[in-house]
Image: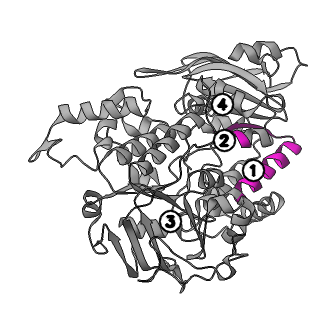
Amino acid sequence: MEANKASAAVSETGVQGGADGEYVVEMLHITKLFPGIRANDDITLRLKKGEIHALLGENGAGKSTLMSVLFGLYQPDEGEIRVRGKEVKINGPLDANALGIGMVHQHFKLVDNFTVLQNIVLGMETTVRGVIRMEEARKKVLALSERYNLSIDPDAKIEDITVGQQQRVEILKMLYRDNEIMIFDEPTAVLTPQEIDELMEIMKNLIGEGKSILFITHKLDEIKQVADRCSILRRGRYIGTIDVASASKEEMSEMMVGRKVELVVEKNEPKPGKTILEVKGLSVASQIAGHKNDVVSDVSFRVRAGEIVCIAGIDGNGQSELIAAISGIGPMREGHISINGEDVTKKSIRYKSTHGLSHIPEDRHKYGLVLDYNLAYNIVLQQYFEPQFSNGPFLNKTAIYDYAEKLIEDYDIRSGEGTETITRSMSGGNQQKAIVARENTRPHDILLAVQPTRGLDVGAIEYIHRELVKERDAGKAILLVSLELDEVMNLADRILVIHGGKIVAEVDPKKITTQGLGLYMSGAKHQEVIGVGEDAPEGALAVSKGGESA
C-alpha cells in the first residue's frame, strides 16, 4: 500500500536537499529500548523551521517515546539529535528548554494545589534576596494569555479548573520560557470541539510568529486542518512522511494501521427492550465554594436494553458529575437511580458493579486503573474477588493471567512484558484499551461509556465502535458520554443534550445536523422538558413544543 502513495509520501532521506538551516530538529536513526520492547527502532524524523509536522501512529507505536527522547526524559540507545544543525546531548527538560524546546504532555505535568501562575513560573522564578517576586511574571503571563487568546485566571488553583484550562496553562508554560520548538502530545484528547478549533488557530498563530511544532495526534481531521507534513510510525518503526495537502485521510489511516479502516460505523436499526437504567430527579450540588446552583439539576431519563443513548454537551456542563453520581464515585444531592427495576441509589460502587453496571470512566488514571499494578491485575480489578479468580483470601493467579492474556489478544493491548507490564509504563491509548476490554467483557446490563475512545488511534476506535454496537445488538443498554460529535452522530440511537446541568433536549441523530445539535449544546436553543412520568412512553424523556428538531 505504501508503494502506491508515491505522489503523497516522501522518504526522509528524500527531503534532505533543502538549504542549510532548513531543519530546526533532526532526530537521526533513533533507537530506544525498554524491557521486552523496542519502542523506537531506527527512526529518523526532521522538523522544518516554521512548519507543523504531525506524528501519526497506532497506540504504542512509539510517538510519545520519541518525543520524550527529544525533550530529554529518555536517553536514546542509538542515534543522534541535531538542533539547528548542531549535534546536541539532551540530558533532561532543562537542557531541552535551554535549546528552546518545550512540550505539552498527554498527561499534564502540573501541581494541583499550586496556582496557575505558580505552575507557569515553576523552575524559572525571579528572586530578590531570596524572596520570590511574582509581579513581573504576572504581567508577562497576562500579556501572553491575551496575545494568544489563552484567557486564564492566574490565581486559580489547578485542582479547581477544567482540563481544557489546564492545557492552556501548559501552553503558557512554553510561551513563558520563549520556546521556539514546541511538542504537542495528543493536545486535543481532553478538549471540547470548540476548544479544539481554538487550539488549531493558536497553533497557526504560533507558526506565523516563527515557531516550529511537532504535533502528535490520532485525529486525521486535525492533521488535515493544520499540518504541513506528517510522519507515520507503526510498531516502533518509521513508515514514511507525507505531504498532508496531497494525501487523503483514508491513505493516512491505512499507512498507520496497515489495512483499510472503516471510518463510518455500520449498524442496524435498534430494537429497544425493557428499561435497564432509570434516573429520576437527580441533582448534584456544586463542590466549588460559593457556588449555590446545582451542577446537575433535576435530571431524569431512561436507557433501555438494545439501545445506545448518548449524552452530548460542551465539557463542563455537568455530564461528568452526572455519571459520577450514577456510578457512585461522586456525590448526589437528591434523586433516585434504578438498575433493572431495583433502587440502587444508596448502594455501594461494588454492589452496582456486581448487579449489572460497567463503567469506562472519564479519568483513566484516577478511577480506571491502579497504575502500579501490573496489566493482569488491572484487567480483573472489578472481578478478582469472584470464585473464578479466587479461593477465599487466595488469588488464583493462573486463572487471572489466562483471562488477562485472552483480553490482551482480543483487544490488541500492546505492552512490553505482556500481563506482567506495570500499567504506568504503558501508553495512554493502551491503558484505555485495557479499561475498555475489562468493562466490555465482564458481565453487565448497562455500560456507562465516558469518552471510550479518548486517545485511541483510528484502528482501535473502529474496533471499540464495533464492540459497542455488538453489545447493543446483544441486548445491553449503553449510556455514552462523548465530546466527539462524529462519534455521537455515528453511534447514538437517541441523544440527550445537557447544558448548564440540565437536559435541554432529546433528539434523533437521523433528524438533526451537527450544527443543530451545537445550538442545543451551546444553550442557544432548548426544548421544553416535561420529564419522565408514569404515563410517558417507554424510554421517553422530553416533549418539545412544536416538535422542533433543529
Q: Are marks 4 and 1 in contact (CB under 8 Å)?
A: no
* Disc 2 packing (10 Å; few <14; some 14–19; many ≥20): some
Query: How far apart are labels 2 and 3 at the CA level?
Result: 23 Å
Identify the element where label 1 is drawn: helix
- For this rendering, which residue is in front, 396 or 540? 540
Which mark is first along the chain, 2 or 1?
A: 1
Q: Range of the magenta residues?
A: 194-221
Farthest residue to the left: give it: 392
Q: Say which of marks 1 and 2 sits in front.
A: 2
Q: Which residue is mark 4?
A: 253
Query: How far apart are labels 4 and 1 at the CA level?
Result: 32 Å
**Does the magenta-highlighted stretch encompass residue 237?**
no
Which mark is first along the chain, 3 or 2?
A: 2
Q: Say which of marks 3 and 1 sits in front.
A: 3
* Disc 4 packing (10 Å; few <14; some 14–19; many ≥20): many
Give me the residue at 39% from left, 51% from top. Answer: 368
Q: Would you identify the image quadrant in which residue 396 lies?
A: top left
Q: Position of residue 326 (x, y in %)?
A: 39, 68
Q: Amino acid at mark 3?
A: Ser
Q: Say which of marks 3 and 4 sits in front.
A: 4
Q: How is the structure coloured here? A: one colour
